[in-house]
Amino acid sequence: MPAPWPRRWTVDGRPVESVEPLPRGADLVGLVLARRLPPDTDGRDAFLSPSLDRVPDPLRIDGMPGAVDAVARALARRDRILVHGDYDADGVTATALLVAFLRSAGADVAYHIPDRLGEGYGLSERSVEVARTLGARLVVTVDCGVSALDEIAALKAAGIAVVVTDHHVCKERLPEADAVVDPKWPQASYGFDGLSGAGLALRLTQALSARLGLGDLWRDGLDLAAIGTVADVVPLLGENRVWASLGLARLNRAPRPGIAALLRASATKAGAPVDEVTIGFRIGPRLNAAGRMGDASRAVELLLATDPADAERLAAGLERENARRQAVETRIFDEAAAQARDFLAARAAAAAAPLPPLAPLVVAGADWHPGVVGIVASRLVEAFARPAIVFAAENGQLRGSGRTAGDFDLLAAIASASAETLRFGGHRKAAGVVVAPDRLDAFRAALEAFAASLPSAADGGAAGSDTPPLEADAVLSASALTLANAVALQALAPYGEGNPRPLFAVRRVRIAGQRAMGADGRHRRYSCVAEDGTALPDGVAFGAVSRPGSFATGDAVDLLFHLDVNDFNGTRSAQLSLRALRPSPPWRVRASAFGAVYRLLRDPRFAAEGLPLDATAAAAAAGPLNGGRPLSGYETETVLAILEESSLVAFAADGAGLRRAVLLPAADRVKLEGSPTYRRLREEGILEPDA
């Protein structure tokens, strides 16, 4: 259970409560664009109207002319071509994109996706063996290869030509291939290094179409380039915005059989628009599931399928694999989160220097599935607002996958700890690393030292917090929450890395009503009214954001939200998709709340099964505290989080699926100062002695 006390909300680094709300007529699109577009990107018109006219010739990409020469030569000779991909969504879409194009161009083409557990990422000895066995005369890599110096040397020694297309960070020396196309090459002159593996494969097919006189054949891969671009979380700026926009249009207009079958298998509503959210939460996870849980080639087969019956069969298989992945992921996340909480609590209670705000969490499990550690790392980042690296034991080593938080350069951090690793690679935002089990603690310490050396760590982070703030684009008045503004903001889509959905705040509104939503009641709809009586659009909170019982009708709250358009039964309206709720300042946690919650945990009514996390019911059971004011639901949640961080409470689900807090035995008196949430409450003056 993440600590409920909200992270600071800021606009341009200033607390939300000190920012003047924007009125109804404010240009929200212009405001967001001014924040999104760095000086070296295209201007407003290019951003709002992405088109091919603004994309440079693919032959300007360093190494591309040589790659086109090599592939065209193989086509002319009827040489067998092997496309070597990767097992994630970007890798399988890049593979399918290039294979489909080469087939249409008349090539003799095969493909190979390495097994995640047996071969690992990129080219390996097995890759060389496959190329030889298949009689390939040319190997073209997609989404991998730039670091495979030895394997490419072995291919060349066997008389096999090699073209590398990759978008990962290069080592100091490039492989001795016939052509290397990687926009992240330090000496590259192209000027845009944000392409995904699928985006780079698309650019290769675009250049080949021009060379071979194939017209617009390359456009058939736009849909796959969009999926790879969004799923790989590359910046949706510059030309990536063009590929994502054009690809999404193609996905909506004429989805290929495999994608149509996958959408049906994932219970996507018929006729619903396919957007970046659909890719991120429906298509991408299922394509990834094939490689995470087994053979990623099944995802390539699905994308290449032309027979609807084959597509339905393959999509059903990926749906089953995704369900299995979700179950495994949930178990591992629960264990990893508990491990992270124990580490943070122990570290906070120790006399050592405080943990730097962005020092990565490092957790490991002997029986964790290596295929899901990256997803678990992402969830830990969301839960703890820190970078995270999750390791799984494999063949006597620890194989880890990491994700970053904020602007923290995870790859640079791992590089600083390279002496403690066996190998590593990746991006600034995501990376993989392998360490020996007996070097894990030293690896963690080296990462902490790197985080401590950053300028932002000198003062312990903003306001002494353990976590970075939630940054909003603006504070809005209630009158600005109109359908017209919601519609105007849609021009900023597709959203993703570098172009997140605009996030706004509204202050001091009163909850006029609330109700549970969804079959299991996990979601919540709030109706709120501003101080001047203006009714806000309904606010919808999903999952953990919904906070059932945290707020009562009549409470004054601040909201953090996306301003969206809701289309329902032919009616369009503005809707607030809530990211967070908090009590409107000033707000306090009274010292007597700790005793009240502790007594509830020991109460015979709750001692056996635990205190239900319907905090309103818990607060009512506690009765009035000192001063006569009842315990609030939010105080209850906050105290429970502090007790959990202090290893006094654990959370578990009962037979009905309701989460409950269970009191744990404690051998010694526990100091609450070990809890990061408690320290923050104290530092920010939130803890209030009872009168």
Image: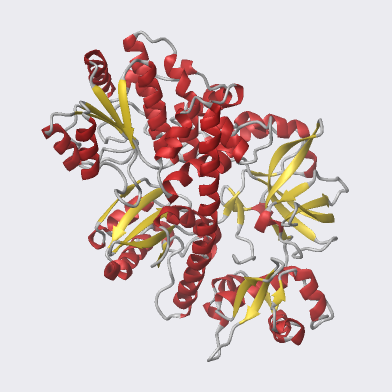
**Residue 163 x, y percent position in the rendering:** 24, 28
* In this rendering, position of residue 361 left or right of residue 617: left
Task: Give me the residue at 55% from left, 90% from top.
Answer: 669
Residue 521 seen: yes
Instruction: Give the x, y percent position of residue 651.
Output: 62, 72
Return the residue found at the far bottom: 668
Is residue 195 visible in this depiction of the protein?
Answer: no
Total marks in image = 0
Instruction: Locate the N terminus by quadrant.
Output: bottom right
**Rendered view: 105 above or below 532:** above
Reply above or below: 108 against 571.
Answer: above
Instruction: Compare residues 269 and 423 and report the one nearer the observer.
Output: 269
Q: In the image shown, does 19 or 200 lie closer to the viewer?
A: 200
Residue at 52% over, 53% down: 324
- The image quadrant that residue 265 belongs to is top right
Residue lying at the far right of the rendered structure:
533
x then y, percent, for residue 278: 59, 38
Q: Is residue 410 left or right of residue 538?
A: left
At 81% across and 61% down in the image, what residue appears?
555
Q: Is residue 9 left or right of residue 219?
A: right
| Residue found 49% across the figure and 33% down from its top | 227
- The quarter in which the C terminus is drawn is bottom right
Give percent across and percent down for residue 468: 52, 57
The color scheme shown is secondary structure
Q: Nearer the viewer, residue 14 or 128?
A: 128
Task: Write down the quadrant of residue 592 in the picture.
Answer: bottom right
Task: Judge left or right: residue 514 versus residue 197.
Answer: right
Above or below, 479 against 118 in this view is: above
**Figure quadrant of residue 263:** top right
Looking at the image, the residue that sits furthest to the top is: 213
